[in-house]
């Protein structure tokens, strides 16, 4: 941790401890209590990173899928609206992580030196941790996961032809509420047809296009249930703000009413986190939420994903039926029913 960040944390904790020590006659030395609080915060940051990362990675991955329904050139004011049903397959390797006492400086695992602990994509088991703050017990029950092998994600997507082979594409999903997790995704992009510059390709019904887009993924999970002698710490919600930029290059070939396509997708996502929920009683003494939100900046990250996508689209008149399969770090499928106005 940078020295400046550690110094700011110590100043905040020190001010709180000064008041804390005057209010509790059984208080140990200020230095020891500050050290214990620092260790507890370090453990919370470590646990946050291991718990939430699989879920935010998965959300960013599935948000990148299914954007290019066809590379074909659209005429001005052509409008297509589609209802989409995305299915994300949760890998077993991302459902749990190994938590060891050697990873922690404040808490210890009850009755064990290590435990398989659910991530936000994991099951409904819990791991109990204990520590001691100012001579008083502190207990933590690890958060559960969504407890699903597949995650369904319905959304609407529309495209509008702007002329010159350019389309505006937009996506919106309602807030999806799962067990212990809820999320929402929306975004907008611009697609431009490239094969219009190669008449011989279009004559043979080959199509090429490029798509650039921005999407936003908002994820909230139920989080740490930490109990102390002065009440719950109020860390019952963890919010993730994911902003993604994507570039996609796709091509397709038409055979009668069928159109088969393939794409290469490059996606860069920026991840930020903050603690939410009703503040605990400790806030009367120490601004723990503010301290933790500042410390969470240390696990902000930017991640690049490169993956492929194949799709098949069948023309039923003004209606199209399409299926997508995305592959890379994860496997993601998408079924779409589109109406062209």
Image (spheres, grey):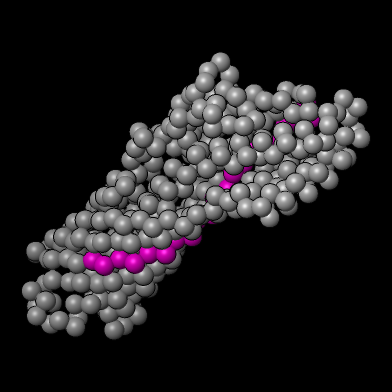
Quarter of the figure with the C terminus: bottom left
Where in the figure is residue 72, as x and y percent of width and height? 22, 72
268 sits left or right of 321 in the view: right
The image quarter containing residue 127 is: top right
Q: How many marks on residues?
A: 0
Tell me if residue 210 can be seen. Answer: yes
Taking the magenta stretch, the answer to whether it contains residue 237 is yes
Q: Which image quadrant is residue 22 in? A: top right
Q: What stretch is highlighted in magenta?
A: 229-250
Say whether residue 287 is visible. no
Q: Is residue 144 above or below residue 2?
A: above
Q: Which residue is found at the position 9% from the left and 64% from the top? A: 256
Residue drawn at (26%, 61%), measured in percent from left and top? 264
Q: Is residue 287 magenta?
A: no
Where is residue 260? Give x, y as percent.
16, 60
Residue 275 coordinates in the image, percent (x, y): 64, 46
Which residue is drawn at the image coordinates 36% and 73% (left, top)?
190
What residue is shown at x 72% (from left), y 51% (from top)? 7
Left or right: 84, with 14 as reference point: left
Query: Which residue is farthest top?
Result: 111
**Of residues 22 and 335, which is closer to you in this image?**
22
Principal secondary structure, stretch drawn in magenta: strand
Relative image position of residue 161 (x, y in whole percent): 33, 76
């Amino acid at each position: 941790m940078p020295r400046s960040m550690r110094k700011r944390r110590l100043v905040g904790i020190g001010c709180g401890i000064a008041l804390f020590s005057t209010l509790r006659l059984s208080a140990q030395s200020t230095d020891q209590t500050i050290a214990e609080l620092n260790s507890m915060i370090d453990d919370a940051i470590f646990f946050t990173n291991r718990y939430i990362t699989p879920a935010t990675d998965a959300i960013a991955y599935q948000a990148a899928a299914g954007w290019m329904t066809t590379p074909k050139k659209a005429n001005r004011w052509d409008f297509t609206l589609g209802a989409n049903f995305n299915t994300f397959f949760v890998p077993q390797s991302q459902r749990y992580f190994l938590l060891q006492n050697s990873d922690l400086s404040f808490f210890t695992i009850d009755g064990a030196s290590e435990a398989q602990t659910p991530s936000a994509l994991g099951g409904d088991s819990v791991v109990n941790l204990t520590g001691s703050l100012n001579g008083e017990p502190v207990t933590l029950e690890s958060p559960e996961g969504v407890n699903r092998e597949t995650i369904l994600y319905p959304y609407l997507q529309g495209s509008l032809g702007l002329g010159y082979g350019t389309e505006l594409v937009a996506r919106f999903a309602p807030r999806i509420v799962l067990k212990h997790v809820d999320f929402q995704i929306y975004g907008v992009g611009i697609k431009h047809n490239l094969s219009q510059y190669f008449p011989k390709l279009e004559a043979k019904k080959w199509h090429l296009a490029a798509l650039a887009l921005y999407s936003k993924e908002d994820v909230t999970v139920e989080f740490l249930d930490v109990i102390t002698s002065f009440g719950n710490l109020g860390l019952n919600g963890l919010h993730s703000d994911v902003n993604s930029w994507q570039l996609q290059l796709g091509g397709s070939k038409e055979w009668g009413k069928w159109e088969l396509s393939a794409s290469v997708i490059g996606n860069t996502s920026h991840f930020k986190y903050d603690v939410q929920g009703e503040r605990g009683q400790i806030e009367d003494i120490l601004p723990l939420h503010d301290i933790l939100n500042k410390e969470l900046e240390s696990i902000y990250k930017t991640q690049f994903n490169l993956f492929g996508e194949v799709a098949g689209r069948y023309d039923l008149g003004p209606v199209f039926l399409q299926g997508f399969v995305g592959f890379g770090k994860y496997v993601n499928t998408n079924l779409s029913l589109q109406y062209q106005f």
